Image (cartoon, helix red, strand yellow):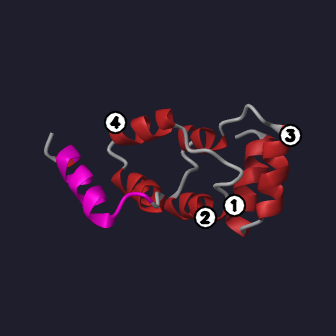
Amino acid sequence: MTLELEIVVNALNDKNIQTIIEYTRNNKNSDLVSELYNSNLLSKERLEFIVRKCMNYLDIPTALVKKLWENNEISLLDIILNSLKFFDNDFIIRLLSLYQNK
C-alpha cells in the first residue's frame, strides 16, 4: 500500500473528510474508490462512509460497479445502489434478484 493510500484509509477509518478533500484536490485523476477495491481495502464500513459523506468529492466509476457485479460483491453493490436516490428498494431488490438468477 502506498503512503498516500494509507493516509486515505486512515482518514476513512477516522471519518476525516478534510483529508479526503485534500487528497482529491491533489490527485484529480485518481480513482480512489477503485484503488481501495483493487487493494482489498474497500470494506463495507469505508464504502458506507464514502457514499454518505464523500460523494461530493469521490466518484464511484461505472467500471468499479461492473467489477463488483462480476466479482459477486453483492454487499458492496447494495450499499452503492441504496445510495442512489432515484431507485427505490423494490427496483434494487429486483435488479439483484435478476443478477442472482442469471
Q: Which residue is mark 1?
A: 12
Are the residues tagged 4 and 2 within 8 Å (C-beta)?
no
Which stretch is magenta?
Answer: 86-99
Tell me if residue 64 comes above or below residue 96 in the rendering. Answer: above
- Dot 4 amino acid type: Glu
Tell me if residue 29 comes above or below residue 56 in the rendering. Answer: above
Classify the position of the C terminus by image quarter: top left
Q: Which mark is residue 49?
A: 2
Q: Which residue is mark 4?
A: 70
Which image quadrant for residue 45? bottom right
Which of the two discs, 1 and 3, labels the residue nearer the N terminus? 1
Nearer mark to the viewer, of 1 and 3: 3
Q: Nearer the viewer, residue 22 or 37?
A: 22
Q: Horizontal placement of 18 versus 44: left or right? A: right
Is residue 90 one of those drawn in magenta? yes
Disc 2 on helix, strand or loop?
A: helix
Q: Nearer the viewer, residue 1 or 5?
A: 5
Is residue 4 one of those drawn in magenta? no
Which of the two discs, 4 and 2, labels the residue nearer the N terminus? 2
- Dot 2 amino acid type: Phe
Look at 58% across and 49% down and name the residue there.
41
Q: Which residue is mark 3?
A: 26
Look at 25% across and 63% down and name the residue there.
90
Tell me where residue 16 appears, x and y as whole percent: 77, 65
Q: CA distance from mark 1 to mark 3?
A: 17 Å
Q: CA distance from mark 4 to mark 2?
A: 23 Å
**Residue furthest bottom in the image:** 14
Tell me where residue 32 appears, x and y as whole percent: 66, 42
